Amino acid sequence: TERSVQVKLVLLGEAAVGKSSIVLRFVSNEFQPNKEPTIGAAFLTQKCRLEDRVLRYEIWDTAGQERFHSLAPMYYRNAQAAVVVYDVTKASSLEKAKTWVKELQRQANPNIVIALAGNKIDLVTPSASPTVPESEDEADDATATPGETGTSGEPESLRQVPRDEAEAYAQEAGLLFFETSAKTGEGVVEIFTEIAKKIPID
Ligand code: GTP
Ligand code: MG
């Protein structure tokens, strides 16, 4: 019969970076555009199937609002894994993520597996970047409306955290690294399967 192991996992990160949305995508394969802030923490479970075993994640989805910060140790205590989330469109959220990583490395289980996830990647990499044919003669078209042309379609315009920078930090700090979108699902299952592969069988 298959080996099954329970894994306690905690999500941490600044308010509104998408922690609950990542969990909702992983557990229900859904997305809610106007997800309400988490109060305290939420608890969910989800199985994760690897080739040789099944893990059962026990997920503590914490509240990012500052007034809940002091509750966090209750949720990361004894956790075997942590997902620290930031928002690729908000530089300050990576700084907050770094402080969570430091806190985990000081206070959590020394063997904890930590993943860093840069979420909302859909806002900076549209799945289909439209190829607009260049018009030879209409460049001076006086009837063009402001906003129809220009930089509004530039794919990288909202990005505040370069992938290279975050990835280099993650490597230095010994973290798994992902860029994700809870909205499209990109990268979400990978967080949990890559963590699962690092959880020792005992
Ligand atoms: P707290 O519970 O307050 O700590 O916030 P949170 O980190 O759980 O964020 P939440 O999942 O509630 O998402 C905040 C907002 O961002 C919601 O309106 C989500 O719909 C939106 N959101 C979350 N993930 C994504 C994403 O990948 N892409 C986009 N475009 N929006 C997202
Ligand atoms: Mg939440």
Image (cartoon, rainbow, N blue to C red):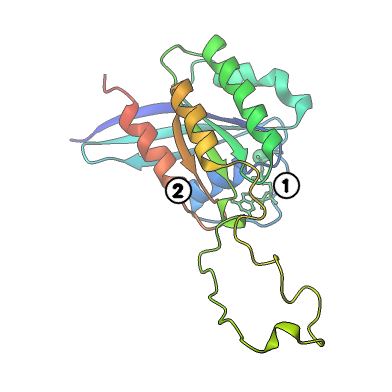
Q: Secondary structure at mark 1?
A: loop
Residue 123 spot, x, y in % from top left: 62, 56
Apparent side of residue 111 relative to residue 28 in the rendered image (left or right) = left
Three-letter code, disc 2: Gly
**Which of 94 and 47 lies nearest the eye of the viewer?**
94
What's the distance in space between the residues labelled 1 and 2, CA to CA?
22 Å
Nearest the eye: 40 or 191: 191
Where residue 112 sits in the image (x, y, percent)? 44, 19
**Which one is earlier in the sequence, the residue at label 1 or at label 2?**
1
* Ligand 1 within 8 Å of the CB at mark 2: no
**Within the displayed image, which quadrant is ligand 2 positioned in?**
top right
Question: Where 53 falls versus 144 (above or below)?
Answer: above
Q: Is residue 125 above or below residue 76?
A: below
Residue visible at 70% across and 34% down? 92
Q: Nearer the viewer, mark 1 or mark 2?
A: 2
Q: Is residue 97 above or below residue 44?
A: above
Question: Disc 1, disc 2: CB below 8 Å?
Answer: no
Residue 120, above or below 5:
below
Disc 2 packing (10 Å; few <14; some 14–19; many ≥20):
some
Instruction: Using the image, tell me which numbered label, if any, was put on residue 36.
Output: 1
Indicate left or right for 129 with 141 as reference.
left
In the rendered view, does 174 fall on the left or right side of 101?
Answer: left
The structure residue drawn at horizontal position 54% and vertical position 56%, both measured from the top left corner, is 30
Residue found 71% across the figure and 22% down from its top: 69
Look at label 1 and name its amino acid: Glu
Q: Quadrant of residue 23?
A: top right
Disc 1 Cβ-to-ligand 1 distance below 8 Å: yes
Q: Secondary structure at mark 2?
A: loop
Instruction: Give whichever of 152, 5 is nearer the camera.
Output: 152
Label annotation for residue 187: 2
Q: Is residue 2 left or right of residue 147?
A: left
